[in-house]
Image (cartoon, rainbow, N blue to C red):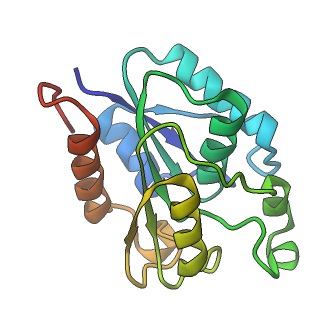
């Protein structure tokens, strides 16, 4: 049985041409729906992720973007993970503690402090070398703290539709490779 992908969007949800929305349709994924897409809090956003996990049967893979990455990390700290979560793809993590973030996007700072403990499931971080929301050095520090693998996407901006990542074939390839590593050989993959 193929694990079900759970899409975990960041601020503002992901628009209709964002890779997360396209993957939701393409892979029949579940999606976390927040009460307020402009007011992230670790407890509130983590609770919505837990609800999505509770109602989605079978083995799961989480796919977070931006503040959705922080949601997954906070959820893992608050809830301790879940035995059905096979792994997480964390794309363009947002650094809520980045200097200047309070001026640039103050609501993101509500997701600080960022947990820096190992995650209880295999994790792949995909980060850009010119993302305005996180430096590659900081993404590397996240990978080390979370015991995650890190892949640089090159100069890919925030890896969203504004940076040209709607149909994101490279991301699908990385997801497929991660699923191959995280699931038993008899499991059908995307």
Q: Is residue 27 left or right of residue 102?
A: left
Residue drawn at 36 percent across, 38 percent down: 25
| Depth check, front residue: 29 or 44 | 44
Residue 36: tell me if it is visible: yes
Residue drawn at 62 percent across, 74 percent down: 134
Looking at the figure, which quarter contains the N terminus? Answer: top left
Vertical order, 37 against 65 (above or below): above
Q: Is residue 111 left or right of residue 126?
A: right
| Depth check, front residue: 1 or 123 | 123
Vertical order, 150 against 26 (above or below): below
Residue drawn at 73 percent across, 56 percent down: 114
Q: Position of residue 66 (x, y in %)?
A: 60, 59
Vertical order, 153 against 86 (above or below): below
Q: Quadrant of residue 173?
A: bottom left
Q: Position of residue 126 (x, y in %)?
A: 43, 64
Q: Position of residue 53 (x, y in %)?
A: 54, 23
Vertical order, 146 against 154 (above or below): above
| Depth check, front residue: 119 or 58 | 119
Looking at the figure, which quarter contains the C terminus? Answer: top left
Q: Position of residue 111 (x, y in %)?
A: 78, 54
Q: Is residue 138 left or right of residue 63?
A: right
Q: Quadrant of residue 104?
A: bottom right
Q: Quadrant of residue 28?
A: top left
Q: Is residue 16 left or right of residue 68?
A: left
Residue 13: tell me if it is visible: no
């Amino acid at each position: 049985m193929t694990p079900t992908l759970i899409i975990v969007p960041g601020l503002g949800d992901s628009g209709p041409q964002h890779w997360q929305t396209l993957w939701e349709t393409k892979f029949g994924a579940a999606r976390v729906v927040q009460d307020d897409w402009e007011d992230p809090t670790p407890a509130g956003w983590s609770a919505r992720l837990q609800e999505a996990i509770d109602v989605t049967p079978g083995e799961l893979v989480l796919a977070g973007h931006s503040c959705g990455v922080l949601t997954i990390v906070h959820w893992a700290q608050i809830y301790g993970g879940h035995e059905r979560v096979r792994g997480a793809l964390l794309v363009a993590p947002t650094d809520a503690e980045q200097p200047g973030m309070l001026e640039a996007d103050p609501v993101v700072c509500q997701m600080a402090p960022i947990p820096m403990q190992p995650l209880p499931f295999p994790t792949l971080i995909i980060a850009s070398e010119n993302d305005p929301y996180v430096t590659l050095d900081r993404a590397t520090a996240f990978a080390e703290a979370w015991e995650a693998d890190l892949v640089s996407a090159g100069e890919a901006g925030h890896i969203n539709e504004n940076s040209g990542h709607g149909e994101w074939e490279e991301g699908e390839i990385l997801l497929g490779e991660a699923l191959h590593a995280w699931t038993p050989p008899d499991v059908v993959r995307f």
